[in-house]
Image (cartoon, grey):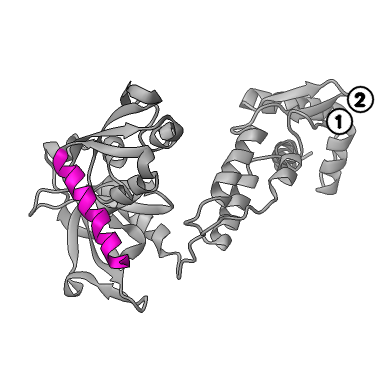
Amino acid sequence: MGAESQKLKLLYLMQMLYEQTDEAHGLTTPELIEGLAERGIDAERKSVYRDIETLRSFGMDIVKLPTRPVSYALGSRTFSGAELMLLTDAVQSSRFLTQRMANRLAAGVATLGSRHQVRSLKKHVHVEGRIKMQNESVFHHVDTIHEALSQRRKVAFRYVKYDAAKRPVPQKEGRTYCETPVRLIYSEGCYYLIAYNDKHESFPTYRVDRMQGLRIADEPAARNEAIATFDAEAYSARTFSMFGGTTQRVTLRVDESVMGALIDRFGKDVESTVAEDGAARAYVTVAPSPVFFGWLAQFGRAMRIEAPAALVAEYVAYLREILEDYA
């Protein structure tokens, strides 16, 4: 066998083991020889054994399965079958992805498993409220932002919102924003860019899918202590739907019936004490906004603000204004 055929023989063996075997399914030596023959490679039993040892030396975890006759299989992979299932479900369940994009990404995940594992991955998950994007530019935007972060450069873009007729309306008369990218956050089905604004020394948040003409600017990114110590996890925990603003310490009285919702929002480590009547007092730091008030209102009397008094008054005014509109 020529040198070129020997190289192809090793690669074909690797391909067959990767695509057709796993910890529960193997290929016997005759099956491997037959597979090589289908690819135009003649092989003998002893040469296949030698090649398997070569692939083991290369680092492939090729194991013998206790079958009759003995079969060979790839014993371990980057992801197990259960992990591939989890990744596929996460992709298919994303509201932000169009169905076409979700299918494409799921197909990519499937290439990481054997054909036996792939059978269980070929399914479609119905996603309630999947966003029907007009285009897929958001993923190009994400790449651009990552590149800007790597190059430590600012990004330039126009920002739009939508009017009552669902038409995109450029903000600030269509002027170009030029700001320092700090972190990308994926929250509630959308990508957000947290940026640093030099003029106001603040951290505004932008929906990535509402950016237009995004590019890497020539201007270097700002560098200061505020950016270096920015805590994205804490920022996400205290904001609702990425509505930023001044934060404050809030005391909530929480009935036991809705403690699960509190933990879902703020985590199991949320600071709290047991109060009377089986309730709890939770101490959280939030950026008050209509979205926070809306989140709170869904629990009715089961969760309410106890302090500070000024925020209680603001929440009452928020609820009263809604009631007056309906009256």
Residue 314: say if magenta.
yes
Mark toward the viewer: 2 or 1: 2
Total numbered badges shown on the rendered structure: 2
Residue 197: say if magenta.
no
Q: Quadrant of residue 278?
A: top left
Q: Position of residue 25 (x, y in %)?
A: 80, 32
Q: Position of residue 274 (x, y in %)?
A: 34, 21
Magenta residue span: 309-327
Q: Which residue is mark 2?
A: 69
**Can residue 195 be seen?**
no
Q: Residue at x 32, y 52 (%)?
A: 192
Instruction: Reply above or below: 248 against 39.
Output: above
Labels 2 and 1 touching (C-beta < 8 A): yes
Q: Which residue is mark 1?
A: 29
Labels 2 and 1: the sequence-earlier one: 1
Residue located farthest toward the front when viewing the structure as drawn: 327
